Structures are given as structure tokens and as C-alpha cells.
Image: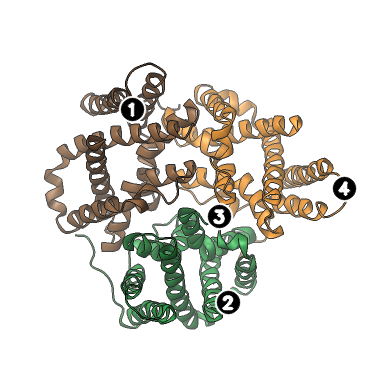
Chain colours: A orange, B green, C brown
Amino acid sequence: MTLLYLLDMIGTAAFAASGAWAGVRREMDLLGVLVLGMVTAIGGGTLRDILLGDIPPFCLQDETYLWVSVVVSLLVFFFPTALERFKSPLLTLDAIGLGTFVVIGTGKALSFELGPFGAILMGLMTATAGGVVRDVLSNRVPLILQREIYASACLAGGGLMVVLVKTPLPHNLTVVLGATAVITLRLLAIAKNWSLPRAR
Amino acid sequence: MTLLYLLDMIGTAAFAASGAWAGVRREMDLLGVLVLGMVTAIGGGTLRDILLGDIPPFCLQDETYLWVSVVVSLLVFFFPTALERFKSPLLTLDAIGLGTFVVIGTGKALSFELGPFGAILMGLMTATAGGVVRDVLSNRVPLILQREIYASACLAGGGLMVVLVKTPLPHNLTVVLGATAVITLRLLAIAKNWSLPRAR
Amino acid sequence: MTLLYLLDMIGTAAFAASGAWAGVRREMDLLGVLVLGMVTAIGGGTLRDILLGDIPPFCLQDETYLWVSVVVSLLVFFFPTALERFKSPLLTLDAIGLGTFVVIGTGKALSFELGPFGAILMGLMTATAGGVVRDVLSNRVPLILQREIYASACLAGGGLMVVLVKTPLPHNLTVVLGATAVITLRLLAIAKNWSLPRAR
């Protein structure tokens, strides 16, 4: 599905920008920024492929993902102030990436015959594990463990997809609905400043 | 072996409680607590299965592990004060989990024809890697690298099992003796406040 | 190739020493020092083998790597002051390990038919991922993301190898040239105190 591949690349680019930006903020050197950009963009899908046994992982089978991550990270490194101006569109692109990664991850897990819980987890992992590794490498508690409707949007979209797959809906529509759920929830959460309850 | 499966579930629940509790203490949100509980409970076995090539890992083949981890983590999130009262029995359940995870990991590694050193390492990893990831995600130096007879009990139990497997003892007895060694050492270490020498 | 295996062991020993030394400095206990030594020495190659699908990874197929790591880590734990005196030769041995690990990783990735980008990444990962895990477990931002021509030397050597493999040069010469490039760059960087540009 060509549209899904295009959205996948948009998500890859947005995630790489967020990773490279974390490196710039921590005053890393060029290589640190590149590594953080790449890990954020491809880390989640790579971990998913390791767990599903699809080896070598997607980004080593199609190096386009590597090139997109590196080029975006280089741009962020050399033009960090430009990124500041794109901050708000970047949040939207990041949400698109989130939705795309969830449906790709959940869909792939289902095609590898995982159960519903495992498939939802694989969608969540595809979308968030790269950001977790980014935060661990930056020596911070991962953002998604602390704040906002981010991972929860992924769980909702993955859950919707796992349910819809059991219905006679065409697969493409299931994918579109799952991704739309994630993106809508995420953008609403940003706009309304929603968050999950915290432990007391 | 049904008893081993029951002990495995007890260990999974105890490990999930310790992970979720770490999330509550760090004031994570609901999702953070769930992730920490799950990672602590299933992380070690998952890493072992990746290294042995048994893919998808145990918890994606039998989703009971996922459900147990999630339900326990939810309980810890919503009733954290109740957990305080169970602190002392939890240490015992944690020790039972430790012993069970070691013999499952070492036994599985031996059945995958690993050498003795590798098999002992796989037992150690099954029992401790989840806790290491929990501490890394909480932005702390992993506890087991710093303190107490915890990992050492795993090494002793795994080592005993690797030796006993070469004798004509029945396999079930080997498993029981290995697990008992870990649990006894661990409980003694807690009672007597033992620790390893530290680097000067 | 016996010389490569010898260099591989020298690198393993040097990397184990650097990992164990990090544990000693953080006042970890005996087991923490052993774990940090082993992870630093074998972590990169293990991650590479997981991504290439060569399971169980090299160090579980040939336990010599495990023994070398453990013995070196024990020496560092019990004789830390001796290590101080060997600091300068250790930097040279570490550079030799770096070059060896890069050519082993890149070469293995090429023989698993990865593309050029992936092969260079696998060389980099073989040489540096163990150190990254060492730093994450020590609760620090990984050194290689921040400082010095370390990872860059790996990229240069891996890149050279990927190019030379396309020429009619004999494979052994390609390996020697790739490793020499890494080692020379790394030693020059130490001597001249080179570093990469930093993000502003």
C-alpha cells in the first residue's frame, strides 16, 4: 500500500527530528545527534521485528529508513533554529507517525499470528520504543512513562484494529480507522492538555 | 510440569508488583506503572528467548503472563497502601520467583544445547534482566549491580543445576534442588543482611 | 583467520577491563563489576548477531569470550590500582579492539548480504554498543554520544571496508586496511585531542 509507505516515511522523518532535537538540546556532538535521531526513528520497529522473528529488521532490508533518518538528523544538527519554527507542524507530523507506526506494528503482529494482547503491545512498541531508547540514552526517565495521552492513544488505536480485524470490514479500512483513532486522540490530547491519572 | 507453571505465575506476579511499585514511587502515570510492571515480570525471559532464538518469546506464545502482569500492576496502582502491608510476604514471593526463573532459564538453555557458562548466564538473565530494565527506565543504577546476595543466589542455583544435570538424578529433582538453593540463599541473605564485597 | 581471532580476544579483554573499571569507579559490588565487564566486552557483538539472526550469538557458541571477560573483570576488581599503571597501554589495546570489532562486524554483515549502510552500522554497533550499555547501566549519558573521535573512526573504517570489498583486493587485505584505518584514526585522535563539532 503506497500511501502507508509514504505515511511511514513521514513518521520516520518526524521521529528522527524529535530524536536529533533531544541530542542537540543535550549538546551532543554530531555523531550523538545522528545516533539519537536514528534510534528514535527505527528503534521501535526494530525491536518489534526482533520479537516477531522477522530478521534482519525492516530498516536493514530497506535502507531508505536509514537514509531518511540520517538526512533529517543532519538537517536538525546544522539548522536547529529552523526546527524551532516548525515545532507546531512537527507535533502534527509526529502524531501521524504515531498512528502509522501503530497500525503497521499491530498489523504485522496479527499477520505473524500473535494473540490480541501481543498484537496491541507490538503496535505500542513500534510507536514508542524508539522514544524510550532516546530518553534512556539521554539519561532521563522516558517521557511516555510520565505524561500525557501518548502511549494510551496507541493502545486505543491498536485495540480498535484488533477488534475490527475480526469483522468483515476490508483490511485497508481497518488500517485507516486504527490510524485515525490514534492521530485524533493524540491531537485532541495536545489541544486539550489531557493526561492520565498519576499514582498517589 | 504443572507445579513449575504455578510457581512461574507466582514469580511473574511478584516481579510485576515490584516493577509497578517502582513506578508508583517515581510518581509515574497509569501507563508508566503498567509498563514497568510488565517489563519487570517478562523482560528477563523475553531477552533469554531472543538470545536462544525461541521466537516469538514465551509471553507472546502464552498471553497468560501478560494478563497476570497487567492485573497485578493495576492492583498496585489503585491500592498502593495495601502493598505496603504485604511487603514482607512479597519478599518471600519474590525469592520464589527468583528460584523458579533461574531453573526455567538454565533448563531451557541446556535444552537448547548451550554450554555450562551460557546456561548459568541464561538463568541469571531470566531472573534479573527484567529488574535491570525496570531500574534503567527509572533512571537508576540497577540495584543488582550494587547490593546484596541477589544475582549471586541465581548464579549458585544455576551452577548447581548445571552440575546436577550431568548426574543420573531425575530431571525434576534437579530442578527442585536448583530452585531451592536460590530461594534458601536469597531468604538467608535477607534475614542475615549478607552482601558481596565492594570494589575499593 | 587466527590473527583476527587473537586480536578479537585482545579487544575483548581490553573492553572488559574498561567495563569492569567503570563498575569499580561506581563502587559496585563484585557481581556488578563482572556484569559491567562482560556486557562491555560482548554486548555489541551480541546485539549484532541478534539483528543478523545468527542465534545463539557468538559468545554463547564459543564461551572463550565469556571466560576472557570474566577473568579480566576479576583481575580489575581485585587489583584496581594495577590497572591505573596500565592506563596508557590500555588505550592502545582498546583502539586495537575497536578496529578488530569494526571489521568483524562489517564483514559479518556483508556476508549476511546487508546493504552498505547496514554493514557500516553493524560494524559501528559491534564496536560501540557494549560501551553504550555499560554507560546506561552506570546511569550516564553514553560517552560516545558526547565526545571524541571514537565512533567516527568506526564509521570511517567500516566505510573503507564496504568500498574495498567491491574492488578486486583480497579479502584479508581489505580487513587489515579497514582495521588499520580505525586504529590509526583513534590513536591520532587521542594524541591530537581531536573532537567532532558540537550542536550549538
Task: Provide the secondary structure element on which disc 1 rests.
Answer: helix
The label on residue B81 is 2
Disc 4 is attached to a residue of which chain? A
Which residue shows up at 57% across the image and 48% down it?
A53
Residue found at the very far front of the displayed protein: B168
Task: Provide the secondary structure element on which disc 4 rests.
Answer: loop
Circle nearer the viewer, 4 or 1: 4
Q: Report the residue marked by disc 1.
A: C153
Q: Report the residue marked by disc 4.
A: A169
Amino acid beneath label 3: Ile
Disc 3 is attached to a residue of which chain? B
Circle nearer the viewer, 2 or 4: 4
Where residue B76 sits: x, y (%)? 60, 72
Task: Provide the secondary structure element on which disc 2 rests.
Answer: helix
Circle nearer the viewer, 4 or 3: 3
Callout 2: few (<14), some (14-19), or many (20+) C-alpha neighbours within 10 Å? few
Amino acid beneath label 4: Leu
